[in-house]
Amino acid sequence: MRDPSIKRRVAEGPNLDPSPVCVLPGCGRPTLQAEGRGLSPFHCGYHVKLKARHGSFLCRTIRAPHLKPYVTAATAWLKVNAMDPEVATAVADVAWSMPHPREAVRADEVRTKLPKEKVRIAMARLRKAGIRPERLVAIHMAITALIAEDADADRSDEYRLVQVGKAVHRLASGTHREGVLGRNSTVPRNPHAIRRDIYPQSSGRVLRFLGSTIEAACGHLTAQHLPAIIALKTERFGPHPSQVPGWVPRWKRELLAARL
Ligand SMILES: [Zn+2]
């Protein structure tokens, strides 16, 4: 708790009647406010961290293999419809939100920037890495389609935006440098050189802003053609497991596990 204003607000006490324990079913941990460690009146430290990291109190980050069929389908759909004016406009809008690569500063210099500035740097970094705007549109379509098809998924805007931000952030987030132990100078091809990979923290508001930036450019296109993307993905890879008869929803699985 480095921000003194947060410390003061905690000391001043709650604005709402806090719950002594986390309100999420089956958790039972004390809330941050009850512990005097934070402002959250209804959630524990574990779930607050989970939400900052994944955009949801309940769902974790979508794994790349689960997302891949949706990205493949969205990419194929975008290719077939590339000449459609709506598609061209969305792709151009995403390209417009990717600044010149010279704005991509080193990852260890990003930490001190404001969230919106961090998003500009992240988008410039993607351009520098040669990531095409069509790929970002495909990722937005893929995440939105997977969340729509997965009956267990968190349907909040927050989860969708953070997941888009995370998937995009993974494409070009690190700075790779070679240096020598004990020195600041960079000496390539030195046998004693160490490789340093620095990744800016993939958490919090930056991911949400990154997701919103992409959604502002292509959200309309995704919403309009979501059924076509899901149909194409189903045709090639089959339905999501939660759409198959006999599937047990998560709440029921957790209830059964708690009774064992
Ligand atoms: Zn909790």
Image (tube, rainbow, N blue to C red):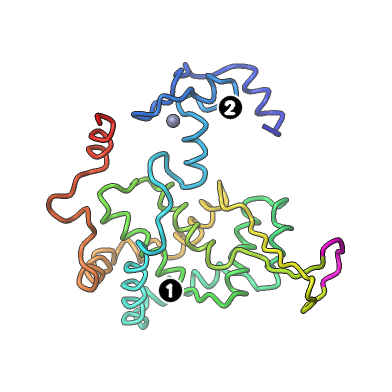
Q: In percent of the image, x 22 and y 53: which residue is there?
A: 242
Q: Quadrant of residue 101?
A: bottom right
Q: Quadrant of the N terminus?
A: top right
Q: Position of residue 257 (x, y in %)?
A: 27, 35
Number of the front mark, 2 or 1: 2
Q: Earlier in the sequence, mark 2 or mark 1?
A: 2
Q: Say above or below: 190 vs 230.
A: below
- Image side of residue 63 versus residue 147, left or right: right
Q: Is residue 8 above or below residue 140?
A: above
Quadrant of the image occupied by residue 238: bottom left
The location of residue 161, given as percent across then percent down, is 45, 53
What residue is shown at x 60% (from left), y 25% (from top)?
37
Identity of the residue furthest to the left in this view: 245
| Pointer 2 with pointer 1, Cβ within 8 A | no
C-alpha gap between disc 2 and disc 1: 44 Å
Q: Which residues are magenta?
A: 181-186
- Label 1: which residue? 89
Query: Is 244 situated left or right of 229 in this image?
Result: left
Q: Is residue 9 left or right of residue 257?
A: right
